[in-house]
Amino acid sequence: MLELPARMTQLQAHIRAGQVSAQDALSAQAEHGQALNAKFPCVVDVLPVKACEEGSLTGIALAHKDIFQLADRLPGCGVGLGQPQVGVQAAAAISSLQQAGASQWATLVMAPHACGATSQNNHYARSVNPLDEGAAVGGSSSGSAVAVAAGMSYAALGTDTAGSVRIPAATCGLIGLKTTHGSVSTQGCAPLAPSLDSVGILSRYAQDAREIWSALCPQLPRVAAMRTPRCHLWLPEDGVAPDVAQAIRTWAAQLDAQVTPLDMADTFDALNRHAQRVLLHETARTHHASLCDGSAEPGVQAIGLMGLGLPLAWYQASMQSRAGLLQDFVTRYFHDAEFLILPSLADPVPDWQTVEVGHVAFDRASLFAMHRYMGFVNYLGLPALNLPIARDMRGRAVCVQVLARPFAEHRLLDFAEQVPPVFWTP
């Protein structure tokens, strides 16, 4: 079998140079992924690998979260196998990748209906973190994170409603790009909270993520990089574990950038309340029938039942305030800086039992720490990048979120390229 290089961009170069055929590359990736699935079970369905159109991703076989429609197939959404249905069109994001030449060899497990900050899913075997089998795997794009970290796929699509790309990326030491809301169509993607849902990308390398982003959103040009980017840094005084905060300070001090600390606690608290209202209400609306007849999955119940009791006026007020709050946020935090840096997870990556609801070792505070700083970004609709920056005392990932102005995904990836990979071959 063909020996695959570490980076997708390297395989692309080999294919373009004629050193390997696109078909041989596709077969090797699919076989490699299936072989690893025995150790890191995250595949829902194995798909026939078909050569797609000629393009920048020709010869690349990927695997994606099972939330996207495929041609003649409805997604399983974390509760079962995909269902064949003649006439179903592939989701817009999948079609964009196919038009760029990418193929898909598998669909991947996820938290049921994308409703969960961890990989907990009673319908499938426990997701195993390839970096540390005792560590938690974040959700809801858990299978995407496992597949990429295990080397089963160079990159994978996920969705991010309240951190569901960034959290699993943070637990598995990956690049996790949450895209600007609306930049990538969610047509053909099962909804959770539609005004918060965003398509995202998980990869080991920023360069590989850029290739996927360029295929998803080719109309956005890459702009010239700033020689010395200016960054704001927010480290909440009472909300981040001391060792996480210290790792971030040490990393920030070594950046080739101008980093200015700031306090945005008041702004965060207000935005977080709005984000929670929208998530609760829209989840309840999306899953209204199953919530009312008692058949909803536990994760959906946990959020949706609260949403059923949320006053409609609260939701309407949050939606009406959204555009103004986004403008205020951009004006306040990006008028003299290009990036805003804050923690991804409030605590070190926990053991999986600690965040498994129903387990004797379950700790609610540990679960809350995984998504505490995520949801407000979805409410604002900003692009955000999870970026691994260090290892903690147990060798697990310490990550930051890097936020930018709307549609600045290329600049986020430029920034990520300046940071040496922590877990993957340079």
Image (cartoon, grey):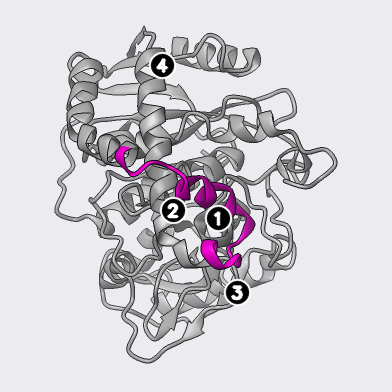
The residue under label 3 is 80
The residue under label 2 is 283
Q: Using the image as rendered, state which of residue 137 and residue 220 is in the foreground.
A: 137
Q: Earlier in the sequence, mark 1 or mark 2?
A: 2
Report x, y in % for residue 75.
47, 74
Q: Is 303 colored magenta in this rendering?
A: yes
Q: Using the image as rendered, state which of residue 426 and residue 269 is in the foreground.
A: 269
User: Circle 1 — which element?
Assistant: helix
User: In 3D space, how far apart are the residues under numbered discs 2 and 3 (Cα atoms)?
Assistant: 20 Å
**Between marks 3 and 4 in the image, the one whose residue lies nearer the viewer:** 3
Report x, y in % for residue 148.
55, 54
| Residue under the image location 37 percent in, 67 percent down | 15
Tell me which amino acid carries mark 3: Gly
The disc at residue 102 is none
User: Circle 4 — which element?
Assistant: loop
**Between marks 2 and 3 in the image, the one whose residue lies nearer the viewer:** 2
Looking at the rendering, the stretch of residues picked out in magenta corresponds to 291-313
Tell me which amino acid carries mark 2: Thr
User: In 3D space, how far apart are the residues under numbered discs 1 and 4 (Cα atoms)?
Assistant: 41 Å
**Between marks 1 and 4 in the image, the one whose residue lies nearer the viewer:** 1
Q: Earlier in the sequence, mark 4 or mark 2?
A: 4
**Between marks 3 and 1 in the image, the one whose residue lies nearer the viewer:** 1
The answer to whether residue 385 is seen in the rendering is no
The residue under label 1 is 300
The disc at residue 255 is 4
User: Circle 3 — which element?
Assistant: loop
- Are the residues at dot 1 and dot 4 in contact (C-beta closer than 8 Å)? no
